[in-house]
Amino acid sequence: MKDYTKRVPKEYYEAIDNGGRLEEITYPSVVYCKDKAPVTKRALVYLPAGYDESKKDYRVLYLMHGGGGNEEEFLYGQDRSLSLVHILDHMIAKGELEPLIVVTPSFYYSDSQSALHDIKEAGVLTKFYHNEFRNDLVPLIDSKYRTIADRDHRAFGGFSMGGETTWETFLNCLDIVKHFAPFSGDCWIVEEKGGATFPEKTSQMMKEYLKNKGYEDLSYDIFAFTGDKDIAFPALNAQIRAMLNDGWDEGPDKSLRYESWEEGTHCYQYIYEYIYNMIADLF
Ligand code: FER
């Protein structure tokens, strides 16, 4: 059994010379959950060290923030005191992680301020986000950057409401993404925090949903991670247990891995520990 309990080395939180760099992109989209009004969206793009000098194509990991967050949150934490960029730089420099592109978008849009503090409203945005991902963001990233533009080399992960977004992306975009990393967030296909209230029904409805989309034979790789002191633990844990009982980890090239970090709570400090431990295994 692989050990997923290693701590991020302290020095990985410091900047290195010749690390990767960030670009900010904006792109046209529409308000998919409401009136299809045009909006301009924003995302940050991490280009690993060597990107500019090489002619290589790179894998892409999309990472979605949680409720009340924004495009920067996943890279710097809720209070901006951390840096996932430094951790990635160190891992890549040490050869612990193949260089990759990381994209951090947002499910919020310019007029969605009320959803910043309303989890129900945020849940509508996370449910609809896959439209923007498929129609607007992925085509842009694949045209603007040197990506390996296929499902085997695309991953989507997210924290909390970004975990919910990850499950919705799994259900709706399995044809274009193979790897998924829901961190501390359950799937709200049945209802808000339905992973806790209706775990079996959540698992069954997800199966039905994939079947109706014609995705039931597609391979996938889900690596869920949370902490046992995380507010999302009861929901995600119950959902994953139900999914494992339902055989989601069985079948050709279908995998569902799940880890829970001792004492882990609902914040990026722990999410970075999870990423440090599992990202090289994700894809
Ligand atoms: C969950 C528990 C909490 C979850 C999301 C939250 C998507 C979000 C809490 C917040 O933003 O306040 O299981 O799953």
Image: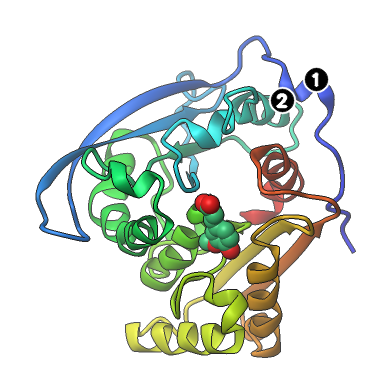
Of the two numbered discs 1 and 2 on the same chain, state the one appearing first in sequence. 1
The reply to whether the residue tagged 1 has its Cβ within 8 angstroms of ligand 1 is: no
> What residue is disc 1 on?
11
- Quadrant of res 113: top left
Question: Looking at numbered disc 2 in the image, what kind of residue is underneath it?
Answer: His
State whether residue 58 is above or below residue 160: above
Task: Please state which of residues 67 and 146 is positioned toward the viewer in this rendering.
Answer: 67
Q: Quadrant of ligand 1?
A: bottom right
Q: Looking at the rendering, in which quadrant would you find the C terminus? A: bottom right
Q: CA distance from mark 1 to mark 2?
A: 9 Å
Q: Is residue 256 visible?
A: yes
Q: Secondary structure at mark 1?
A: helix
Residue 57: x, y in percent?
45, 38
Rendered position, 249 above or below 188: below
- Asked whether the beta carbons under mark 1 and mark 2 sit within 8 Å of each other, the answer is yes
Judge whether 25 appears above or below 218 on screen.
Answer: above
- The residue at the far top in this view is 17
Quadrant where the image shows the N terminus: bottom right
Residue 140 location in percent, x, y? 27, 41
Q: Which residue is mark 2?
A: 90
Q: Is residue 283 left or right of residue 188?
A: right
Looking at the rendered structure, the secondary structure element under dot 2 is: helix
Q: Is residue 253 visible?
A: no
Q: Is 268 left, or right, of 44 in this rendering?
A: right
Residue at image coords 70%, 54%: 281
